[in-house]
Amino acid sequence: MPKPRPIEIALFPLKTVLYPGGRLPLRVFEPRYVDLVTSCLKQSVGFGVVLIRSGSDSRVADQRQPDIYNIGTYAEIIDFNQLKDGLLGIIARGKHKFRILRKYEMDDYLLMAEAEFLPAEAREPLDASHMDMVGTLKELVKHPMVQKLRKQMHLDIDYNDASSVSLRLSELLPLDPDAKQTLLQLNQPKERLAELARLLRALSE
């Protein structure tokens, strides 16, 4: 089978990680990103969310682009509105993980990339050893902040699927962005659950 051809996507570097199936609210104010959102809505295309490794998420003539991780999540805009402060608000939904093959900058400082989509994670049943993780997720979901998020963002969880449980735990646990990126880059749901178990033990110590 021939290897899929690379795709061209616009990048939105942020100091947060978006997971497949996750929701991300954004306040858009920089002209390059307002133009990007407008273009995405007109053409029914998405953009790539990538975590900033170092540097600023702002880009002006005397600054370099931030250093970013090369694996991110392709997102589609599912809602938009004008916020009370007059800025554009959007909600993006994570779709597919991708790997950056080459990146380059446009005249307006918008960062672009040639990228390839990574294989989607297969649905996988949970083992008995993962029930503690399911319990942790269910307790997290009861938290008032998460309840509010779930109502606003339609947070869907399949408690019988290792991928869904591991991704939503990765999303909701109070982990630093680099740890969240590590979890994103893992390809096997049960491997992600094992890493989450290790991180939870470290948090409780």
Image (cartoon, helix red, strand yellow):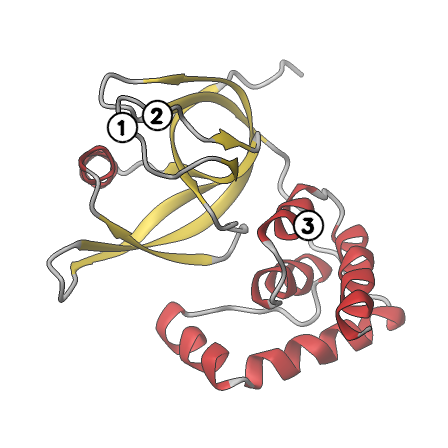
Give the Cα separation between the discs numbered 2 and 3: 30 Å
Q: Which residue is mark 3?
A: 183
Q: Is residue 85 left or right of residue 20?
A: left
Q: Is residue 33 above or below residue 179?
A: above
Q: Quadrant of the N terminus?
A: top right
The answer to which image quadrant residue 168 occupies is: bottom right
Residue at image position (75%, 56%) is 124
Q: Residues within 10 Å of mark 1 (few under 14, many from 20)?
A: few
Q: Is residue 90 left or right of residue 182?
A: left
Secondary structure category for the residue under label 1: loop
Q: Position of residue 165 (x, y in %)?
A: 67, 65
**As shown in the figure, which amino acid type bears the numbered disc 2?**
Gln
Whether tag 1 and tag 2 are in contact, CB under 8 A, the answer is yes
Secondary structure category for the residue under label 3: helix
Q: Is residue 137 above or below residue 49?
A: below
Q: Position of residue 194 (x, y in %)?
A: 83, 58
Q: Is residue 24 above or below residue 37?
A: below
Q: Position of residue 45 (x, y in %)?
A: 31, 36
Q: Which residue is mark 2?
A: 63
